[in-house]
Image (spheres, rainbow, N blue to C red):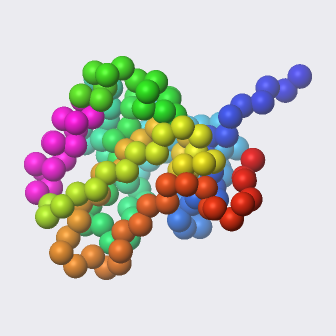
């Protein structure tokens, strides 16, 4: 009997062919790039800040239009914020504060998708928070998808 495991990636949410290929390779190998033991091997950008619950690194695939794009990731593999204790929420706030102080941007935006990635627009099942720094004149509008495609076709 083969064991059916949850998908780790939604390659449909990839924003480039390089990212899509990376996701498909990792999915095939059963490797979650955001699980702490895999991150240093499969993510190019190094961890810059470490907390008790979260680590922080630049996104390997920054969104166009951002002046900086960081990922704040829990060490444990969860897909939803409410699987972490309230103390993790407090630490998340301090991570955001540290990034803001470091980058000193004009403005920031954070996006956290929670739950089933087939419906929240995410590309990796492991919970992560996007932290983007914004400039006065971005090369293009920064956009985050936070739902399924809305074409009535569920990806299962
Ligand atoms: Zn994981």
Q: Is residue 46 visible?
A: no
Instruction: Report the number of numbered marks.
Output: 0
In the rendered structure, the answer to whether residue 140 lies left or right of residue 17 reads left
Report the span colored magenta.
91-104
| Residue that appears at 30% across and 66% down | 66
Task: Relative to 50, say whether 136 is above or below.
Answer: below
Report the front residue among 23 and 95: 95
Residue 50 spot, x, y in % from top left = 26, 32
Residue 133 sits in which quadrant? Answer: bottom left
| Residue that appears at 24% across and 29% down | 91
Residue 1 spot, x, y in % from top left = 89, 22
| Residue that appears at 68% across and 65% down | 151
Task: Relative to 11, say whether 81 is above or below.
Answer: above
Task: Relative to 156, say whether 135 is above or below.
Answer: below
Q: Examine the residues drawn in magenta and state their main secondary structure.
A: helix
Residue 18 sits in which quadrant? Answer: bottom right
| Residue that appears at 22% across and 79% down | 137
Residue 20 sits in which quadrant? Answer: bottom right
Report the front residue among 110 and 46: 110
């Amino acid at each position: 009997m083969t064991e059916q495991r949850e998908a780790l990636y939604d390659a449909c949410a990839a924003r480039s062919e390089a990212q899509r290929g990376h996701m498909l390779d990792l999915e095939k190998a059963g490797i979650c790039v955001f699980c702490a033991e895999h991150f240093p091997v499969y993510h190019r950008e190094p961890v810059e800040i470490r907390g008790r619950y979260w680590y922080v690194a630049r996104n390997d695939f920054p969104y166009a239009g951002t002046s900086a794009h960081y990922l704040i990731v829990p060490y444990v593999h969860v897909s939803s914020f409410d699987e972490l204790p309230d103390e993790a929420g407090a630490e998340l706030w301090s991570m955001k504060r540290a990034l803001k102080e470091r980058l000193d941007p004009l403005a920031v935006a954070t996006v956290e998708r929670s739950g089933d990635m087939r419906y929240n627009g995410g590309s990796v099942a492991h919970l992560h928070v996007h932290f983007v720094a914004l400039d006065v004149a971005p090369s293009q509008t920064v956009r985050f998808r936070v739902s399924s495609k809305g074409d009535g076709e569920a990806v299962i």
